[in-house]
Amino acid sequence: MTDQRELAAALRAAVRGEVDFGVTARALTTMDASNYRRVPLGVCAPRDADDVAAALAVCREHGAPVVPRGGGTSIAGQATGTGVVLDFTRHMNRLLSLDPEAGTAVVQPGLVLDRLQEAAAPHGLRFGPDPSTHSRCTLGGMIGNNSCGSHSVAWGTTADNVRTLSVITARGERLRPGPGWAGAPEGLHPLVDGELARLRTGFPELPRRISGYAVDALLPEHRADVARSLCGSEGTLAVLTEAELTLVRAPRARALAVLAYADESGAAQAAAGLLPYRPLTVEGMAADLVPSGADLPRGGAWLFVEAGGDTEAEARAAAETIVRAADVVDALVVTDPARQRALWRIREDASGTATRMPDGSEAWPGWEDCAVPPARLGAYLRDFRALLAEHGLRGTPYGHFGDGCIHVRIDFDLLTGPGVARFRRFSEELADLVVAHGGSLSGEHGDGQARAELLPRMYGAETVALFERVKGVWDPDGLLNPGMLVRPAPLDADLRFSALPREPVDVAFGYPADAGDFSAAVRRCVGVAECRTTSVSGSAVMCPSYRATGEEEHSTRGRARLLHEMLAGEVVTDGWRSTEVRDALDLCLSCKGCRSDCPVGVDMATYKAEFLHHHYAGRRRPAAHYAMGWLPVWLRWAARTRTAGAANALASVRPLAGLAKRLGGIAAEREIPRLAGEPFSRWWRRRRPSATGEGRLVVLWPDTFTEHLSPSVGRAAVRVLEAAGLRVALPPTLRLPSGGRRVGDARSRSPLSLLTARRGRVCCGLTYLSTGQLDRARTVLGRTLDLLEPVLATDAPLVVLEPSCAAALRTDAPELLHDDPRAARLASRVLTFAETLETYAPDWTPPAVNRPVTGQTHCHQHAVLGDAPDRRLREAAGLTGELTAGCCGLAGDFGFERGHYDVSRACAEERLLPAVREAPQDAVVQADGFSCRTQLEQLGGVRGRHLAEILAEALDRRP
């Protein structure tokens, strides 16, 4: 039995990189993207090859297994283990050299594929293999799994693009494998010489044969390529420290042909026939994985076929030739790069989308990437569907149809004994089916624990015994990634779900998409790690704190892993009181980006609120939770006592402001926002006693920020809405006895009942939600629903100007008050400013601004509300250009809270501030959220405006 403390101390003494045997580090590495969970002893992040050698020596001395790990996106379990995890992503993540003339690159194993692609692109080069996880998978992991990707029909697998490797064996020998037996350990050559006949006849010829060891690469006719034989060995033979790769010449132009078929069988049968046209990709997917409204030609299944050329016209001509050769229901050819990226995103998101069936039930990997000869794909899919039906299972195939490689997630029941038994029976029968079609159990992701047990069905016992002898030559002590490929762990052992509680956890939110089960909500994270991308692309937001820190615990996946371990109770043992989970969630901005950008819809903002609710139950909270969580109360008091001016004056005195910030848990670097001298609703009452006009009635929501901090936004919205012919009212401020129902001027006066009326203000509860004060949020929202009963009795929409408040009302309120049907009715009434104009004033022409626009789409708008109406309204007003994506970094109370300033600033510097600095001098800066405007003002010295203010100013200039 390895002594964990002694091992940790020995590693710290031997290596210069970080050694972490703490709860958080271990919890973050219990799982990859597979069904499996194994608890490691600890994590070591080596700085270089010397550190790797030192770590191996220490682990060998202590008898501790070693698990090399890259991005942790493996789907078969090979990135999990019970020993010491070597994390190459922290330090050994560099591009060491790139030779454009030779078309080669030398990389360290922790380098993310996209970083290599970015460096190669200016030279017209790229690395051929490109799995859908290209933005976060590492080259070391790709070599370990022999990854492929969508372009393998043109450029092959990773093994086809590796020249030489630098590795260290478990016994410390440094080798440089390559062709001609270069870098072979002693004993490998004679072992192969004695098995030449078996190697020539026992390995199926497939473009996607990834299963087992590639020992046949050592045949003389294959140049005895030791480097190639190591590709796909899943870290079980040696530890990679460096790799020399071959780059390919990328076509100057590309055209994407999307071919529509009636069903997946038709698409599968057609795929092989397109290969003679030398396409770059032949990818397939069916309608079950396509989001509604996707811009695809009509059909039930599609092939994504990419063609290249030196010019756009040449690429388009090649794609159109493919369309003419294909027997399709419908087709689409796209040459615009942005539209191509949007279409490819549909295909790439399938790895996450497939984890939920159309009815919302869960689906899992395990048989994620079997491969058969492309010509047999149609027949195989029919038999595969029949086998699913026989076992009462469901799954939607997709993947690399041109290579005969199919991805599928299946709705296995991995939570009960009978379900796990069926999982085993199905796995055994499917392995036999794949072999009957001349296929490979793995066509891309490796065998790992999911399929290694079944390799004898594919290769036979004698060839598997040969694999064991190869393992013995490279790793005689069995130190490297034991349980994978040879002497494997059972495919139904170590399932990650077995550690979770069987009974539903008592929670505050309703989790409607997960049948009210918090464990099921946490299980949504399957580890595909799209949250670990290091740069924002397109309109994505997730996950700003990870991009600021680079730490796994600050990614959505990392936080979900810690919550999983909290529920499991083995590594994180103190449940809701866990400081490890609290600290990981502390830098979550609650931007809700994961709600839309995560392919499986993980909603970490909700999980954070839930955790904080339980973590601080019956305990004193941080000062910021009282200072900013109760902000509506403090601002309302200031308004009632008319002390806003005095508060602003005191806040301008630096010592007093500093004292207030210390007491309130506010970052010293922050300025305290000024309170409005006249709240918005007071202006409203002074301006007019009641709503007038003949237009459609809309109820304008006086959120806390508009009411007390930015009343100019409310005034501008009234100006624009009325100019559009709408009749504006505010919500009631009195809750009346039955019979006193009237919206009118939004004060609902009834002479007979004013004496018994209860006064109040509507509030979305946002500040309580974001700080996890869910009991208080329920109370506030309940009072709001009471006040709004006269509004809900009409068909009047609620116009909410602050995106965060609109998102809270539309999603958080019905999920928290899941037992109150009024919350769902309220949510259905919530409209943004642009949605209101588009829906209720469709014929109104906005004033012409005719200026460029810059700024940022609010993260909650992106994640929950959508911004298509805003885009159309800007276009109609002559506001040219696009708003940037990402998160401003202030995010309500987050950026004000002590300890968050640096991360908040880093988030702003990622996209928002550079976009504003680089904008034309006459550009209008749009920022619909109060937090975004505050961040712009405090960090950029720029005044941002709500879209309502921009249009109102243009109205004032209109003749």
Image (cartoon, rainbow, N blue to C red):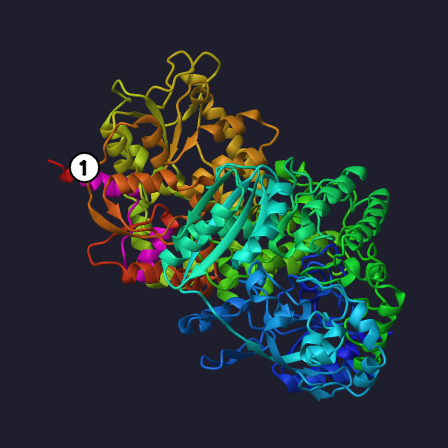
Q: Quadrant of residue 919?
A: bottom left
The one of 895 and 519 positioned closer to us in this rendering: 519
Amino acid carrying mark 1 in the image: Leu
Residue 255 location (% of width, % of height): 43, 54
**Would you say residue 558 sits in the magenta stretch?**
no
Image quadrant for the C terminus?
top left
Residue assigned mark 1: 955
Q: Is residue 187 left or right of residue 70?
A: right
Circle 1 crowding by C-alpha within 10 Å: few under 14, some 14–19, many from 20 = some
| Residue positioned 70% across, 40% down in the render | 506
The count of marks equals: 1
Answer above or below: position of 394 versus 896: above
Q: Position of residue 817 (x, y in %)?
A: 58, 32
Q: Is residue 705 left or right of residue 881?
A: right
Image quarter where the N terminus lies is bottom right
In the image, the segment drawn in magenta is: 932-955
